[in-house]
Amino acid sequence: MRRGSVVRAALLPAGCAALIATGCGSSKTATQTGLRLQREDLVVAAQALRSAETGVEREAQTARAAWPSVANGLPASAPPATRRLIREAALRAGALPLPAPFTEERSRALTGVAAGLAGTYRGSRSLAARGWKLIDYALGKVEEGPPASASFARKNVALYIESVYDAHFALAQIGKHLQAGYETLGGPQSFGSSLTQAEVSQLSNTYSEAKLRLHPHVGVRLGT
């Protein structure tokens, strides 16, 4: 070994220096380790999404019932049945489960697609809950508040309405991203029984535009 090589080896961590002959630190080894970690994290993310399925489906059902009454802005007044739907939507959104791996603290350890899925779910959950709550508050101001408060609420409620729509649109993309990540990371051959194609397909169906996107499209913009 040349003198320069000896010096460089001495500067390496002991474990790595001992494995130079086997290619320690090689890009191939790093890539395989990274892929394995991303697969493990995707399995964790899929399990988290599965645990939240029932809550998500219930929230979507309630949101779809309330959505047509606010999609184009607040009504001058809402009948009691409409107010109940809006409040129920706010309660359901606020009760959406937050799986432990998707909490802000624990999701920092996730890699690859799993990290994106966690961020999308957590952000959508928060956006939907806050949006419905503020829509209900704004409607109360329009119906019962002084003229100035009613005017302010009507001018700004579009932001809350858009928040609810955007939250559901984002949730509806999770299935696509899960399926794409699963395929990119090797699909059934790489995941085996830890995450099957059938399980991914089921989750993709739950977190899809067909199940979660709101209709009609939001018809108001801030200031209108």
Image: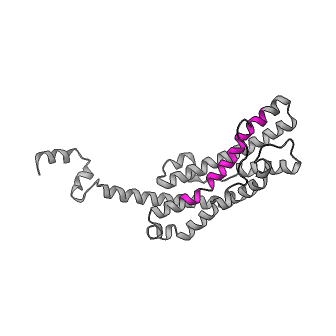
Q: Give residue 22's position: percent from left, percent from top.
A: 24, 59
* Residue at x 71%, y 48% (from the top left corner): 218
Q: Is residue 143 left or right of residue 3?
A: right
Q: Quadrant of residue 131?
A: top right
Predominant SS of the magenta segment:
helix
Colour approach in the figure? one colour
- x and y percent of residue 74 in the render? 80, 43
Counting from the top left corner in percent of width and height, residue 159 is at 70, 40
Q: Is 160 located above or below residue 192 in the figure?
A: above
Q: How many marks?
A: 0
Residue nearest the viewer, comparing 133 with 71: 71
161 magenta-colored: yes
Tell me the magenta residue range: 152-177
In front of the other: 145 or 68: 68
> Looking at the image, which residue is at 54% across and 45% down?
105
Horizontal side of 46 relative to 71 (left or right) equals left
Q: Residue furthest left?
A: 2
Tell me if residue 218 is in the magenta stretch.
Answer: no
Query: In the image, is residue 83 above or below residue 208?
Result: above
Residue 55 occupies quadrant? bottom right
Q: Residue at x 65, y 49 (%)?
A: 167
Q: Is residue 97 left or right of residue 7?
A: right
Residue 21 x %, y %: 21, 58
In the rendered image, the quadrant that contains the C terminus is top right
